[in-house]
Amino acid sequence: MQNFEWVTPTKVIFGSKILDRLGSETGRIGKRALFLYGKESIKKSGLYDKVVSQLQGEGIFFVEHGGVQPNPLIGHAEEGAKKIKENHLDVIVAVGGGSVIDEAKAIAIAGCHEEPLWNFYLRKASVDRALPIVAVQTLPATSSELNGASVMTNEVTQEKFSVRSETLYPRVSFLDPSLTLDIPVQYTAYACTDILSHLMEAYFTASDDFPLQDGLVEAVCRAVMDALEIVLTDPRNLEARSTIMWAGALAWNGLLKAGVEGASIPNHMLEHPLSGLYDIPHGAGLSIVIPAWLKYKKPSIAHRILLFGERVLGLGPTLNDKPPLEGADIVIEELETWYRHIHTPIRLREAGIVSLDIDACTRQAMALSVYWDVPGYDEHDISAIYALMK
């Protein structure tokens, strides 16, 4: 294993009825809050009233900033930062899924800096401080509640880039699985696709076998797939929802890829242009990208594909005595079958993308390959992978 550093400064409070502690936990951090959320669903569910009651009960002044989009926009974050500065706010309470928490991090940056916010996502400026964040996760998928990364879309340039800093980890994250019981099954499927992609990235790009990390990833993948299978027929199963919520927090916070040599994120590099340009769900984009990427890369990663097929998909007997490339094709086909089973797209047209602007996507992916240090891809490689998504 390689040398590594792993940081997790976030306090996690997990379980049912934990929001009774939201006011007291927030009050220890600040007394003037920006209350950030998405659309009107938290008002319909009663969660909005719960949060307001908690903040008011602790004597916390707050300003609301609703309307966060599924692919959060930099302009909306800048409006939130303006409220921070005008009202001298000192903490952000982010209630929602990964998009809301990602935008909270953008606002946390902009609220402490005069530099144009997008410059931090272009890596033209460094984050040296940020406002503290209290997160209430309602749609587990991105691990934003337990990492220091933020992904935002620039609505002017249609670029979808990210920033990372230890200052951006939430101070406290509330993970109450009961808040996820009414998430539509289809959105749960997109979320699980995202969670699995976070696990699969390092697994498939690893330069060698890493028994400890491989075993952890394989176990979490199986748990997520099994839990989703339960949710497909029993959407309000609390135990299955709990598994998905905790897996979502762990999958992308650095723990499961720590020390894995060669680990990189080419599938996210390829997907961000899709959801940035065409505003499709991130999970839907990933279920399109991953099979195409596997097909392109199988000559060099067939061994890892076969391990995944045997240990996660249960294809051991089917793969016995098969040549590596033939076996890899079987695994990829089985993965596509599973994506179809959970009703996520595996081709661009299934996501409503009739004509892909390969040149524009390739330019963005090439820029991300530099920002994220994803080696081994040139314009020909990236264009060829996009072509396999048709």
Image (spheres, rainbow, N blue to C red):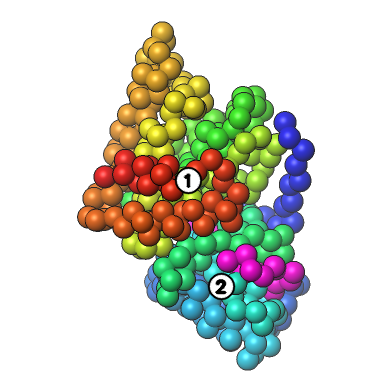
- Mark 1 or mark 2, which is nearer the start of the sequence? 2
Query: In the image, what residue occupies the spot 53% across and 76% down?
Result: 77
Query: In the image, what residue occupies the spot 60% across and 72% down?
Result: 119
Q: Secondary structure at mark 1?
A: loop
Q: Is residue 209 left or right of residue 390?
A: right
Which SS type dominates the magenta stretch?
A: loop
Are the two marked residues, 2 and 1, in contact with CB atoms closer than 8 angstroms? Answer: no
Residue 85 image offset from top left, x and y in percent: 65, 87
Q: Label 1: how many residues lie within 10 Å, few (<14), some (14-19) or many (20+)?
A: few
Which residue sits furthest top? 321
Q: Is residue 283 left or right of residue 263?
A: left
Image quadrant where residue 275 sits = bottom left
Q: Which of the two discs, 2 and 1, sits closer to the camera?
A: 1
Q: Is residue 40 visible?
A: yes
Question: Quick one: quadrant of the C terminus?
Answer: top left
Q: In the image shown, does 134 or 207 lie closer to the viewer?
A: 207
Residue 139 image offset from top left, x and y in percent: 47, 57
Which residue has dot 1 on it? Answer: 378
Residue 165 image offset from top left, x and y in percent: 69, 61
Residue 246 image offset from top left, x and y in percent: 57, 46
Above or below, comparing residue 333 to residue 253 in the picture: above
- The magenta span reads 120-139
Image quadrant where residue 315 sits = top left
Q: Is residue 15 visible?
A: no
User: Any magenta on residue 125?
Assistant: yes
Above or below, comparing residue 359 to residue 380 in the picture: below
Which residue has dot 2 on it? Answer: 118
Q: Amino acid at mark 2?
A: Trp
Q: CA distance from mark 2 to mark 1?
A: 25 Å
